[in-house]
Image: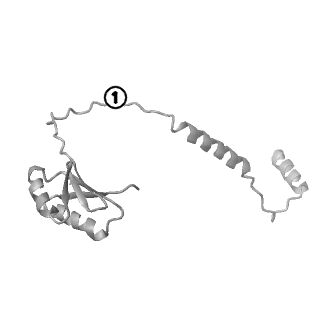
Amino acid sequence: MQVVMRVLRVVKNMNFDWNESPDLNITPLVDIMLVLMAILMVTAPVMEYQDDISLPKGSKAKTMQKIPDLTVRIDKSKRIFVKNRHYALKTFADDFHLLSKDIPKKSVVYIKADKSLSYETVMRILKIIKDSGFSKVSLVTNG
């Protein structure tokens, strides 16, 4: 009991301002968290996990046969080159239909046209190729 009385006297002699709000200094806490985060960011990419897993064996696959590509080139004088042969623009529709009978329709056809040609000419060639049954046709640029 005497101890309690002494504590009360000491507290009574101290001048406390009960309306004062304490200031919390969180700067050291933030510094520690930033250091921990930097350590985590440096070490996380370096960590490697090794799990022993057994993968299932796949079925034996057939070897796929590569479908040859076809390149159609048009120069500025509107001559069309396919497989080292040249064709005239006027007769290209019939010539290409005859030529495309021997080519698989799943082949990719690349059109390389001179930049001085009109849009109409290139789209006409594209339409002829699409009408022959090719669905994978691409225009090639230098860009």
Local packing at callout 1 (Cα closer than 10 Å; few below 14, some 14-19, many 20+) is few
Which quarter of the figure has residue 56?
A: top left
State the quadrant of the C terminus: bottom left
59 up-or-down from 24: above or below: above
In terms of depth relative to the viewer, which is nearer, 13 or 128?
128
53 up-or-down from 34: above or below: above
x%, y% of residue 124? Answer: 22, 67
**Going by the picture, which residue comes out furthest to the right?**
13
x%, y% of residue 136? Answer: 21, 56
124 up-or-down from 111: above or below: below
x%, y% of residue 128? Answer: 17, 64
**Going by the picture, which residue comes out furthest to the front?**
77
Residue at the spot x=22%, y=64% of the render?
125
Residue at the spot x=39%, y=55% of the render?
142
Q: Which amino acid, by three-letter code, is at mark 1?
A: Asp
Which quarter of the figure has residue 109?
A: bottom left
Q: Report how many numbered discs are placed on residues in the image.
A: 1
In terms of depth relative to the viewer, which is nearer, 47 or 72?
72
Residue at the spot x=29%, y=62% of the render?
77
In terms of depth relative to the viewer, which is nearer, 69 or 47?
69
Residue at the spot x=36%, y=62% of the render?
115
x%, y% of residue 41? Answer: 56, 42
Q: Report the side of 48 relative to 55 (left or right).
A: right
Q: Secondary structure at mark 1?
A: loop
Which residue does the numbered mark 1 point to in the structure image?
52
How has the structure been colored for display? one colour
